[in-house]
Image (cartoon, rainbow, N blue to C red):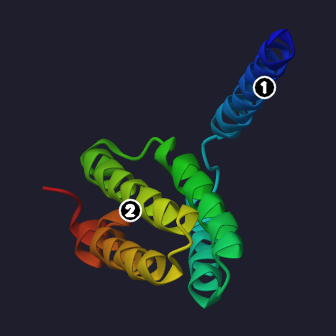
Amino acid sequence: MSFLKGIRLTLVVICAVQLFCNQAISQEAFKTVTASTDVEATMKTMSLTYKQAMKTTEPSTMLGRIDKLQHLVASVQLVKFDKKRHAILQQGLSEVQAQLSLVHRSLTHNDITAAKAQLEKVAELRKRYHKERSPDIWQLIFGDE
């Protein structure tokens, strides 16, 4: 009986250590996010990573691409945009992060078909919010009203 208690205690300790390590790794990934210094270059990297993710056939490989996308989006979320556009751009980035979380969840269940369908919604969000990223030609010529 004491032998079983010893095994049980050992398993509890091992599980606790594993849980602690997983949390530490997860928290470390978010601690290392810094504000993008070149939003345009970051957006190009996001576009390439998106295309690579859509071409992927293995859930584990796609999961790595989604993790990279989430990290890139987080780095852009830390950028201070001009006051007029900041709120709308942050809203768009938050929606992209939420959608990427859904993709991530599908991939953890090895459902690559659902993940790709959800990832297509990220492209729709990009198109919708991309217009807000830079001023149009009339704003450059006449300024903001």
Whether residue 41 appears in this view of the structure is no
Quick one: 107 or 39, which is closer to the camera? Answer: 107
Compared across the picture, whether 13 is left or right of 103 comes to: right
Quick one: 27 or 32, which is closer to the camera? Answer: 27
Marks 2 and 1, how far apart in space? 36 Å
Looking at the rendered image, the quarter that the C terminus falls into is bottom left
The picture places residue 36, in percent across and down from the top left corner, at 62, 50
Which residue is under mark 1?
A: 11
Residue at 74 percent across and 36 percent down: it is 25
Vertical comparison of 3 with 116: above or below: above
Q: Residues within 10 Å of mark 2 (few under 14, many from 20)?
A: many
- Choose top left, top right, bottom left or bottom right for residue 2: top right
Amino acid marked by disc 1: Leu
Amino acid marked by disc 2: Gln
Whether residue 116 appears in this view of the structure is yes
The extreme front residue here reads 1
Total labels: the figure holds 2
The picture places residue 38, in percent across and down from the top left corner, at 63, 57
Residue at 65 percent across and 61 percent down: it is 68
Compared across the picture, whether 130 is left or right of 115 comes to: left
Q: Are marks 2 and 1 in contact (CB under 8 Å)?
A: no
Quick one: 117 or 51, which is closer to the camera? Answer: 117
Q: Residues within 10 Å of mark 1 (few under 14, many from 20)?
A: few
The picture places residue 97, in percent across and down from the top left corner, at 43, 55
Vertical comparison of 67 with 7: above or below: below
Residue at 33 percent across and 78 percent down: it is 127
Which residue is under mark 2?
A: 99
Vertical comparison of 11 with 34: above or below: above
Q: Earlier in the sequence, mark 2 or mark 1?
A: 1
Looking at the rendered image, the quarter that the N terminus falls into is top right
SS state under label 2: helix
